[in-house]
Image (tube, rainbow, N blue to C red):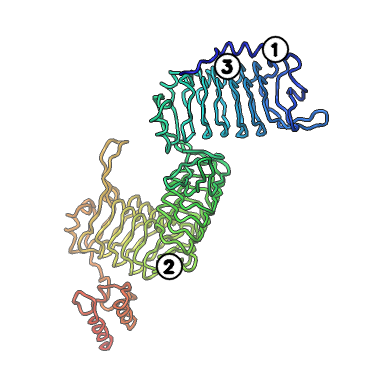
């Protein structure tokens, strides 16, 4: 049966009469604007002057932490019964040594707008804030378990209230006639019980939004009385502690997350502990979740505990433009895609043994000047360190079986793939090491000091955006053996005036030469026109379909293309190539010398050694030059034929 309550107005009148009878004897002493009653163990409570505190206090006040009277120092640990009732307060700051707010403490403070309390408060008495008609800002302690009878009744300016994780019970009329509540945030994982249906008004339950922890939302949507709310939604986090937001995982661990989808959730110095202890148990903090610190531009430092953290999540620190440095603990195994992308102030990142994976564009466009990759690293994407225009050197700890540093340039340990050239190196020329077969994604992205890049005969593939925005590059000659130049490979090499494409080339990706505004000559040695890919998309700004070709409309009109004499008609009829208005025939010299296996321009004993090494180990060679006997295969017969050539030389 629903509990019957005394009419609040009757309660108010009764309490006023009791307080009036106390008169001038309501306090033990006065000090610096506050009245106190002495309690046990040198503690005091704040109280009123007389007549239930009418006009006792006014304006903005901060309650003292301690007070000295007659030579004795007292700790202020309590706000007494009726202490501020009927006072003309506007704002109150409650210090961190006050644990108890007595009944009626702020009742009928008509002008009170804001109350700041700390988590030291463990108890709030009945009707403590009842009738505070202008109250619109109050933070309830995270150690409150009960909202007592009528505590926030008639607080009709209150639009948002946050109920703490610790809350277990809301007693009768806790928010009665608080009719303008628009948002109720309840952080409790186990739904708090209600004394009756009068805790919230019917219009609040119909119109307000109830926000609850996402992992525990079923606690509220499926059970009365919380399911009376028409609008129940999930928060972005399960709990916030010391300004850090977390979600729980099914494994019994936690990940750091963000406050809401406006992101920019953190500022200043942030500390992430190794574990969180709650009444529900202890939770290891295992991950920095997706978008956790995204766009937190005013965050200046992050301290990561080294005990349990395993993952730095996707875009977790992306666009944290005020972060200058970070140290990754040894427990971390994975730094996910875009984790530190666009951290434009990030100059130092410390990686430790234990790290296994660095994801796609994980540190792109940062201010990192140098980096050391640990021996434990197993995987790093080619563009993980791209666009770092301050980076001058990439080191790899000895013993890494997958990667190596060659004069500060990152290669795979077998030397077959150039992963990253530090874009901040001041050199004007770079020679890619012989034996390199692949230039990885974004490998030279924004290497703006390079005017010349020399590629080895061993090269076979140029991946996406490999030379993007090499703005000082004058020309590029792709050696014979290259079969594939991927999309955007030379994008915005805007000073490059000519390029040479080899006879072996069979594929060019879309936008491969986009924004190469100075490109005036293309030499193509392939007798069969290489296939040029396209990318089709819809431009909503111009309301039209768009096709991106390997080359640009300006190049189609103005760039001269020189192709093998016998292939002119093939190019003029081939997709993409037929768009060029200036296609000319040219007699190219042979690109290789039969028997010149090592590609040094002469046939000698070193070619025999290179050919034997190829047959034994599969090392990189010019296979056309190595087909000495002309049978379209490489075998011991070619070794014999090559030796015969050397023996029969005049």
Q: Quadrant of residue 597?
A: bottom left
Q: Nearer the viewer, mark 3 or mark 2?
A: 3
> Measured from the top left, where is residue 24 in percent x and y?
76, 15
Say which of 531 and 252 sits in front. 252
Residue 20's label in the rendered image is 1
Left/right placement of residue 33 relative to residue 639 reads right
Whole-angstrom CA distance, mark 3 to mark 2, is: 71 Å
From the image, state whether disc 1 or disc 3 is nearer to you.
1
Mark 1 vs mark 3: which is more N-terminal? 1
Tell me whether circle 3 and circle 2 mark residues in contact (CB < 8 Å): no
Residue 407 placement (x, y as % from top left): 48, 67
Residue in front for this viewpoint, 566 or 404:
404
* Upstream in sequence: badge 2 or badge 1: 1
> Where 17 falls versus 35 (above or below)?
above
Q: Residues within 10 Å of mark 3 (few under 14, many from 20)?
A: many
Q: What kind of element bears circle 3?
A: loop
**How many angstroms separate mark 2 from mark 1 (CA)?**
84 Å
Direction from residue 73 to residue 626 in the image, left or right:
left
Residue 531 appearing in the image: yes
In the figure, is residue 87 to the left or right of 545?
right
Tag 3 residue: 131
Q: Residues within 10 Å of mark 1 (few under 14, many from 20)?
A: some
Task: Say which residue appears at 66% left-offset and 31% top-offset.
Answer: 98
Tag 2 secondary structure: loop
Query: How crowded is the residue under tag 2: few (<14 C-alpha within 10 Å), some, or many (20+)?
Result: few
Is disc 1 in contact with disc 3, using a CB cutoff of under 8 Å?
A: no
Q: Which residue is mark 2?
A: 401
Q: Is residue 54 visible?
A: no
- Please provide percent x and percent y for residue 163: 52, 30
In the picture, residue 476 is in which quadrant?
Answer: bottom left
């Amino acid at each position: 049966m629903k509990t019957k309550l005394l009419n609040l107005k009757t309660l108010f009148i009764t309490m006023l009469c009791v307080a009036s009878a106390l008169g001038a004897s309501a306090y033990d002493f006065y000090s610096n604007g506050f009245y106190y009653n002495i309690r046990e163990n040198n503690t005091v409570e704040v109280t009123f002057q007389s007549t239930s505190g009418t006009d006792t206090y006014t304006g903005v006040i901060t309650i003292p932490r301690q007070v000295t009277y007659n030579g004795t120092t007292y700790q202020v640990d309590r706000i007494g019964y009726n202490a501020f009732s009927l006072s003309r307060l506007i704002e109150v700051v409650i210090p961190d040594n006050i644990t108890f707010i007595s009944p009626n403490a702020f009742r009928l403070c008509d002008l009170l707008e804001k109350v700041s309390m700390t988590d030291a408060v463990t108890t709030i008495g009945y009707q403590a804030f009842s009738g505070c008609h202008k109250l619109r800002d109050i933070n309830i302690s995270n150690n409150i378990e009960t909202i007592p009878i009528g505590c926030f009744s008639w607080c009709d300016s209150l639009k948002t209230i946050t109920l703490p994780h610790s809350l277990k019970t809301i007693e009768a009329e806790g928010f009665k006639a608080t009719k303008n509540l628009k948002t109720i945030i309840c952080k409790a994982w186990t739904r708090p019980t209600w004394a009756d249906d009068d805790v919230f008004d019917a219009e609040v339950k119909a119109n307000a939004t109830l926000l609850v922890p996402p992992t525990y939302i079923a606690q509220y949507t499926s059970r009365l009385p919380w399911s009376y709310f028409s609008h129940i939604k999930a928060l972005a986090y399960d709990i916030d502690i010391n300004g850090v937001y977390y979600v729980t995982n099914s494994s019994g661990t936690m990940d750091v997350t963000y406050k809401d989808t406006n992101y920019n959730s953190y500022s200043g110095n942030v500390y992430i502990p190794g574990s969180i202890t709650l009444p529900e148990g202890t939770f290891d903090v295992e991950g920095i979740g997706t978008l956790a610190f995204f766009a937190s531009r005013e965050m200046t430092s992050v301290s990561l505990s080294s005990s349990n953290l395993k993952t730095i999540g996707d875009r977790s620190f992306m666009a944290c433009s005020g972060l200058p440095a970070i140290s990754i603990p040894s427990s971390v195994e994975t730094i996910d895609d875009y984790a530190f992308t666009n951290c434009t102030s990030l100059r130092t990142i410390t990686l430790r043994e234990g790290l296994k994976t660095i994801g796609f564009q994980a540190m792109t466009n940062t201010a990192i000047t140098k980096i050391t990759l640990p021996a434990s690293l197993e995987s790093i994407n080619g563009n993980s360190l791209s666009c770092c225009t301050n980076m001058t050197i990439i080191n790899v700890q000895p013993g890494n079986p997958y990667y190596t540093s060659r004069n500060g340039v990152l290669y795979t340990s077998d030397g077959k793939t150039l992963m990253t050239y530090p874009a901040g190196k001041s050199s004007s020329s770079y020679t890619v090491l012989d034996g390199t077969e692949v230039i990885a994604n974004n490998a030279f992205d924004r290497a703006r000091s390079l005017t010349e890049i020399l590629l080895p005969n061993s090269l076979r593939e140029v991946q996406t955006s490999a030379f993007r925005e090499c703005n000082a590059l004058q020309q590029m000659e792709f050696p014979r053996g290259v079969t594939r130049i991927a999309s955007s490979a030379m994008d915005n090499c805007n000073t490059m005036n000519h390029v040479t494409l080899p006879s072996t080339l069979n594929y060019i990706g879309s936008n491969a030469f986009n924004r190469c505004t100075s490109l005036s000559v293309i030499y193509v040695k392939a007798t069969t026109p290489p296939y040029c890919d396209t990318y089709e998309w819809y431009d909503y700004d111009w309301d039209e379909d768009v096709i991106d070709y390997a080359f640009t409309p300006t190049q189609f009109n103005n760039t001269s293309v020189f192709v093998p004499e016998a292939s002119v008609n093939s190019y003029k009829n081939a997709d993409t190539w037929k768009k060029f208005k200036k296609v000319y025939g040219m007699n190219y010299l042979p690109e290789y010398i039969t028997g010149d296996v090592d590609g040094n321009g002469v046939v000698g004993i070193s070619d025999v050694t290179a050919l034997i090494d190829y047959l034994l180990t599969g090392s990189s060679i010019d296979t056309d030059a190595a087909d000495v006997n002309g049978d379209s295969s490489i075998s011991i017969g070619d070794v014999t034929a090559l030796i015969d050539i050397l023996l029969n030389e005049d």
